[in-house]
């Protein structure tokens, strides 16, 4: 049996080697946690979130000592006890706490090559009816996250009545937390909603010049509008409409933009009420069909609504494609380096193709995924990875949870693959399947959506894009759903260029969201078919690095090392992380320590709810109600912003 106090009393100083530590509130909280782990203090002296974490960690430490882990832990203790340095032999640490850094091989280039082989799809059969007119056949979507005005600043809202109502609403309690949400009344030049839509309008203008015979005068865009404070909900559409009108409207030519708040999604269910079988079905649909809450809720809504839209409003819609509004299509670079524009890249005969994966299983590439290039890197070329390669070993938290490496590996192996180059798939008979996808630059054919019915559970609050595919792992049948990698379908990521203040303001939420992601993904994977081990084997290395056998240990050590490192952030910034972690982590951990299977039961309810929704679409299609169609089209008319 491993002496855990001895383990942590040796491990923590080794991880803190080269880390600047201090004595402010955040660092003291971390130090208290380290002392408890090393056996030098009582756990009841800890404050949240460490008090709850330590209880969960004690349970996981017992699990960690079972099987081969016990031998590896003993070896690590002997190594550290004899004066060994993790900087010199980090693989001893990673073998136990972060094996993804050594995924498939310890040589980085071989890691990339071997991962690309595991993502290879062979014996491709092109889509029977590929998209040929993306501007007419795709309903573009994006999510808008809104919050209260910036403290101490007068919101830029011309309508005095609306400004007063927004300021009154801001006094209410906050229900939901998002990464860098858009404040009501933010200046137009820093408003990512306006920025992204203008970028899409410019991209469509290029498409019309390249294809002057197009009869599509406008591209349809659906926005989910989520708010951090419930009182803001009835004001969101009014404010966004004012932002997108007036002088800015001329910059949105070619777009037809619709926005849906939580109240609007409830009204959609009201329209469908006569077709819903009883109160139980209605209650289940209300749980999943909406936009307020964790990220998974609006993400699933944005995939599902286009399917309903195609049945009740426009049968010409055959697919949906999500963009993030801090990203734009760099049409000039796309055309120069690929010979194709954004919409031409979307019209791929492989979107909807079928083939066999490396295990011989049939895979339907009904989803599509592109990639990103940072605004500051595009001058080096369109195919410049947005994740830099880690040139040296990090220290502290980043050494323990070395996500930079698997992220860099999967970015190069999956996102940067160019068909037809030496040793690469040819893009005709062979292609690459994507597991690592981003929140924008991905889409799904409605035929595939309705057949496989993927969704992101509403308990997923981060990486909702990567969680989406996990729901299909529970499906039975000879064909599974997958993402097609479309080379060159690249959007330029501009967030730092136009809204760096929002990025800075959202750092604490983003970091704590990463910790929550580890806890949630680890639980989620554990009850999928094959369990955590098999699920992780499919989605490793990057998505899988957030699926951990001992997630509380990983989260606890990461948080403490982050707070202890005074060179990482200011005292105020680390204190903000501590306070937000104290608010969010205990809630997630409480569910983890609750009755076994709670999360699995919730997932089963949501699986049933989405089955009800897609069964409803089938019924609507076979016996279309004129009243339902009229009411739905009236609603979307009222939800139109531009």
Image (cartoon, rainbow, N blue to C red):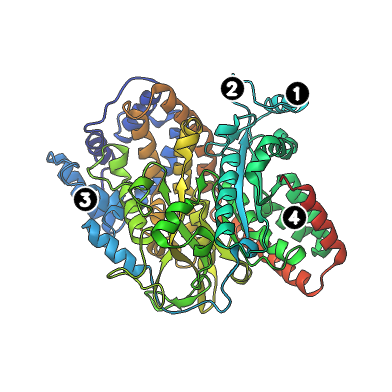
Quadrant for residue 85, please give it: top left
Per the image, label 1 sits on a secondary structure element best described as helix
Q: Earlier in the sequence, mark 1 or mark 3?
A: 3
In the image, residue 14 lies at what x, y percent? 22, 37
In the image, residue 95 lies at what x, y percent? 25, 53
Q: Earlier in the sequence, mark 2 or mark 3?
A: 3
Tell me, yes or no, whether the two marked residues, 3 and 4, touch with CB atoms within 8 Å. Answer: no
In this rendering, position of residue 230 left or right of residue 535: right
Between the residue at mark 4 and the residue at mark 1, the CA separation in whole angstroms equals: 39 Å
Q: Earlier in the sequence, mark 4 or mark 2?
A: 2
In this rendering, position of residue 548 left or right of residue 323: left
Q: Earlier in the sequence, mark 2 or mark 1?
A: 2
Between the residue at mark 2 and the residue at mark 1, the CA separation in whole angstroms equals: 18 Å
Q: Residue placed farthest to the left in the image?
A: 82
Say which residue label 3 marks: 91
Q: 524 above or below 228?
A: below
Toward the viewer: 31 or 180? Answer: 180
- Front of the two marks 2 and 1: 1
Between the residue at mark 3 and the residue at mark 4, the CA separation in whole angstroms equals: 50 Å
Task: State the count of labels.
Answer: 4
Say which residue label 1 marks: 160
Say which residue label 2 marks: 151
Q: Earlier in the sequence, mark 3 or mark 4?
A: 3
Look at the image and tell me whether residue 133 can be seen.
yes
Number of the label disc, if any, that sits on residue 283: 4
Dot 2 alpha-carbon crowd within 10 angstroms: few under 14, some 14 to 19, many 20 or more: few
Per the image, label 4 sits on a secondary structure element best described as helix
- Front of the two marks 4 and 1: 1
């Amino acid at each position: 049996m491993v002496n855990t106090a001895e383990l942590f009393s040796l491990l923590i100083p080794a991880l803190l080697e080269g880390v600047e530590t201090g004595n402010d509130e955040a660092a003291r909280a971390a130090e208290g946690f380290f002392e408890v782990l090393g056996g030098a203090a009582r756990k009841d002296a800890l404050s949240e979130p460490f008090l709850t974490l330590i209880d969960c960690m004690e349970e996981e430490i017992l699990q960690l000592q079972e099987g081969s882990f016990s031998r590896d832990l003993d070896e690590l203790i002997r190594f550290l006890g004899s004066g060994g340095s993790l900087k010199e032999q980090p693989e001893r640490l990673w073998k136990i706490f972060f094996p993804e850094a050594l995924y498939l091989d310890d040589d980085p280039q071989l890691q990339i090559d071997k991962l690309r082989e595991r993502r290879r799809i062979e014996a491709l059969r092109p889509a029977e009816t590929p998209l040929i007119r993306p501007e007419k056949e795709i309903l573009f979507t994006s999510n808008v996250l809104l919050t209260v005005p910036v403290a101490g600043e007068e919101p830029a809202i011309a309508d005095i009545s609306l400004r007063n109502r927004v300021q009154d609403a801001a006094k209410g309690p906050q229900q939901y937390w998002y990464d860098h949400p858009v404040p009501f009344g933010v200046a137009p030049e820093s408003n990512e909603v306006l920025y992204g839509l203008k970028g899409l309008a410019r991209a469509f203008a290029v498409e019309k010049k390249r294809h002057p015979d197009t009869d599509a005068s406008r591209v349809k865009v659906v926005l989910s509008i989520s708010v951090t404070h419930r009182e803001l909900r009835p004001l969101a559409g009014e404010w966004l409409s004012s932002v997108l009108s007036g002088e800015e409207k001329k910059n949105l030519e070619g777009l037809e933009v619709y926005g849906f708040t939580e109240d609007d999604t409830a009204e959609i269910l009201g329209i469908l009420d006569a077709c819903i079988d009883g109160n139980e079905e209605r209650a289940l649909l209300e749980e999943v069909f909406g936009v307020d809450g964790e990220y998974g809720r609006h993400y699933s809504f944005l995939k599902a609504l286009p399917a309903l839209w195609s049945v009740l409003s426009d049968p010409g819609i055959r697919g949906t494609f999500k963009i993030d509004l801090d990203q734009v299509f760099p049409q000039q670079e796309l055309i120069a380096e690929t010979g194709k524009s954004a919409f031409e890249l979307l019209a791929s005969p492989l979107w909807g193709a079928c083939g066999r994966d490396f295990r011989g299983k049939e895979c339907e590439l009904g989803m599509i995924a592109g990639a990103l290039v940072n605004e500051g890197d595009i001058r080096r070329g369109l195919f410049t990875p947005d994740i830099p390669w880690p040139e040296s070993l990090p220290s502290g938290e980043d050494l323990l949870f070395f996500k930079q490496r698997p992220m860099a590996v999967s970015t190069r192996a999956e996102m940067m693959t160019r068909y037809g180059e030496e040793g690469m798939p040819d893009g005709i008979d062979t292609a690459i399947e994507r597991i690592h996808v981003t929140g924008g630059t991905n889409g799904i054919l409605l035929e595939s959506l309705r057949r496989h019915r993927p969704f992101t559970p509403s308990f997923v609050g981060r990486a909702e894009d990567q969680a989406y595919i996990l729901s299909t792992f529970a499906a039975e049948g000879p064909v599974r759903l997958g993402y097609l990698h479309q080379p060159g379908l690249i959007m330029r990521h501009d967030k730092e260029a136009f809204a760096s203040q929002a990025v800075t303001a959202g750092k604490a939420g983003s970091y704590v969201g990463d910790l929550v992601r580890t806890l949630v993904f680890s639980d989620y994977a554990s009850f999928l078919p094959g369990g955590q081990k098999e699920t992780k084997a499919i989605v490793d290395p990057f998505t899988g690095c957030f699926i951990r056998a001992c997630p509380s240990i990983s989260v606890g050590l990461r948080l403490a090392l982050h707070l202890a490192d005074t060179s990482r952030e200011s005292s105020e910034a680390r204190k903000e992380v501590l306070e937000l972690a104290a608010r969010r982590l205990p809630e997630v951990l409480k569910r983890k320590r609750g009755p076994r299977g709670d999360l699995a039961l919730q997932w089963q309810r949501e699986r049933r709810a989405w089955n009800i929704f897609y069964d409803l679409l089938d019924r609507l299609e076979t016996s279309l109600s004129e009243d339902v169609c009229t009411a739905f089209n009236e609603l979307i008319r009222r939800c139109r912003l531009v």
